[in-house]
Amino acid sequence: MNKKMFTLDHKLAAGEELSEFEKMMLASEFPTPPVRNAIVEGVVVNKSKNGYIVDIGQKCDAEVSFKECSEDLDNGSTHAFLVFSEPDEDGGVMLSYDRAHNWIGLIDLVHSGETAQAKVYAIQHSRGGRVSGVKAVVSGVRAFIPRSEMLYRGNLEELLQTEIPVKVLEADPVKGRFGQLILSQRRATEMRQDEQLASINTGDILKGVVSRLIQPGALVDLGGDVTGLIHRTELSGNRHAEPADVVQVGEEVEVKVLNVNMDKRQVSLSRRAVLQQSFFETVQDGDILEGVVARFQDYGAFVTVGGCVDGLLHTSELISVGSVSETFKVGEKIRVRVKTVDAERQRLALTRKGTGNGNSEQVA
């Protein structure tokens, strides 16, 4: 407040009589200066050696320094500016062209729902020491991502100094000291997942990288934001093998899409199906193969060949006399000959005849 208005206020409070000039001043109300961080509209009236002089409808013009303006502004042009200083005694404030347009862009993202990239610079903890979220910067503005809005299964420390996709949930430049910008990494990731999942169909053959081994099987990074699961029964022909015995973390694998669940954002994959497809494209009647006895049935033994296909060795095709269980053991390596191939139904009939009657050996 300037000194003249201060004197008038005190005269009014004391009940003193005002002069005609003082009454005229009182009748001409001074506009209330905008609050800090408010976005205002102003007209460029002049260019000085330090920046621009802008009329924002106050009794005193405001200033914009060159470092707060990345564009050349013409006299008479109207723009949005952000107030980043407290008003002086005459109501004058300092403005920023760049900060205003950064905030305007963020506010637009709230309404459009589009994603942005944010750089994580710190992990925030609650008073109890628990992680409450992460601090990030987007479009030059400091932001906060609550823990509930993070979709990251690893250690959040790994995200420091990295950029992550985010959706802007709230953008209010006036709230708080630096404005309030709330982001969501979870919603941005889910939106990108939905877009990627929409392009994946059952039956597709995809390439991915094994990212993690878990009890049910192996997680495969399909690129982008989508991870699929190969159930342990779909890793190889040996449905009982441990995932670590079949694939390793970091290994590139080719997989077939068995199912896409859009609601749960889950993709079921099969490595075995791809191996089987490749196997049936090359195997022919009469081929002699080495296989491993997988299991027994009353009518014969199933032998895993090519590491992916269980062919049937019928009891009638055994050379030795006696029951199957007495002839072979599960895990035993034997030589077999392909009798017939049914590629359409992916079935294989095997025989021991014509294999040279080589000795079988126990698989370690």
Image (cartoon, grey):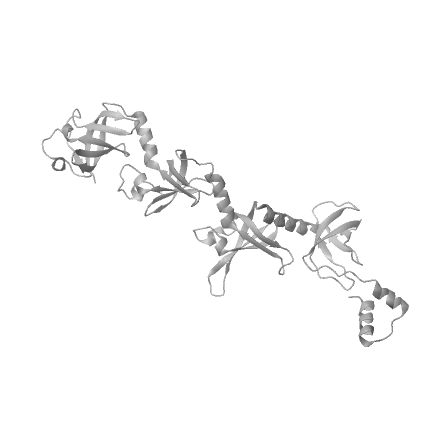
Work out whether residue 47 can be spotted.
Answer: no
Q: Residue at x 82, y 70 (%)?
A: 8
What is the count of numbered marks? 0
Q: Above or below — where is 275 with respect to 108?
A: above
Residue 114 appears left or right of 345: right
Q: Residue at x 43, y 44 (%)?
A: 265
Q: Above or below — where is 276 with respect to 176?
A: above
**Image quarter hosting the C terminus:** top left
Q: Above or below — where is 249 with respect to 348?
A: below
Residue 141 at x, y percent in the picture? 61, 53
**Image quarter hosting the N terminus:** bottom right
Work out whether residue 231 can be spotted.
Answer: yes
Residue 116 appears left or right of 73: left
Extreme front residue here?
A: 263
Splitting the image into 4 quarters, where does residue 210 fall?
top left
Splitting the image into 4 quarters, where does residue 222 fall?
top left
Residue placed most toward the observer, 55 or 197: 197
Residue 329 at x, y percent in the picture? 16, 38
Residue 74 at x, y percent in the picture? 77, 45
Extreme left residue here?
A: 321
Residue 176 at x, y percent in the picture? 62, 61
Residue 41 appears left or right of 282: right
Splitting the image into 4 quarters, where does residue 243 fall?
top left
Extreme right residue here?
A: 20
Residue 16 appears left or right of 204: right
Q: Above or below — where is 244 with respect to 28?
A: above
